[in-house]
Image (cartoon, grey):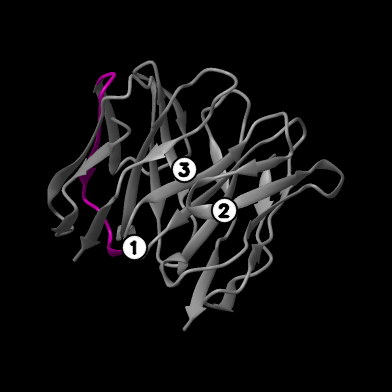
Amino acid sequence: DTEVTQTPKHLVMGMTNKKSLKCEQHMGHRAMYWYKQKAKKPPELMFVYSYEKLSINESVPSRFSPECPNSSLLNLHLHALQPEDSALYLCASSQPTTGNTEAFFGQGTRLTVV
Amino acid sequence: AQSVTQPDIHITVSEGASLELRCNYSYGATPYLFWYVQSPGQGLQLLLKYFSGDTLVQGIKGFEAEFKRSQSSFNLRKPSVHWSDAAEYFCAVGRAAGNKLTFGGGTRVLVKP
């Protein structure tokens, strides 16, 4: 199983809503990532979890709150978002050890903030 | 800091013709290099990777890439493109510690019949 599964595939939310994006992998990977991708742009790293601990936060606004409940799951909690936060949110996983940084990506959640 | 440049924003190629996508990187140590492909509205699929060893690497879908340290390049090639190769292609560099990828700006490939 080399899949990273993201739910939902599409999400429309208002600026006062609270929602969560979910990501799951069963490859035994111990590093998981959230990337944000605006239209016609490359993915930009938001957060990295290594062994279920937050290791990198790329100065992301606090309205985005990541959570890693266990080694297979990664959530991104959303609250009070702005229309400019509309984007494709990609989850990825990999082994965190030296020598193999191959990351597997999910299909993404297309988020629209209205 | 690591960085990746893909000089070509768009490339149009005829079906059956060869394709080469350019990638230049900047990194202080031995880089870990990747090519990903993304169809519209989809996630990223890994085409191939280079960690060490043979500088010509083979990937999926008939793609190959060559690592040239002297030119800081990792160009992607395919001898004969198919209409299904129309997509966005991203080159990326990763740290040896394995927990951060930096992507180039991407190259959009259009395939003419």
Q: Name the residue carrying label 2.
A: B63
| Distance between the alpha carbons at the discs numbered 1 and 3 | 17 Å
Q: Name the residue carrying label 1.
A: A84
Asked which secondary structure carries label 2, the reply is loop
Q: Position of residue A13 (x, y in %)?
A: 14, 58
Q: Is residue A11 left or right of residue B50?
A: left
- Chain at tag 3: A
Residue name at image x 52 percent, y 17 percent = A97
- Chain at tag 2: B
**Magenta residues, as a range?**
A70-84
Asked which secondary structure carries label 3, the reply is strand
Residue name at image x 47 percent, y 49 percent = A44
Q: Position of residue B33 (x, y in %)?
A: 63, 40
Q: Amino acid at mark 2?
A: Phe
Taking the magenta stretch, the answer to whether it contains residue B106 is no
Asked which secondary structure carries label 1, the reply is helix
Residue name at image x 13 percent, y 46 percent = A18
Q: Quadrant of the N terminus of chain A?
A: top left
Residue A45, numbered label: 3
| Residue A58 higher or lower than B37, as above or below | above
Local packing at callout 2 (Cα closer than 10 Å; few below 14, some 14-19, many 20+) is some
Residue A93, numbered label: none
Q: Position of residue B59 (x, y in %)?
A: 55, 45
| Distance between the alpha carbons at the discs numbered 3 and 2 | 26 Å
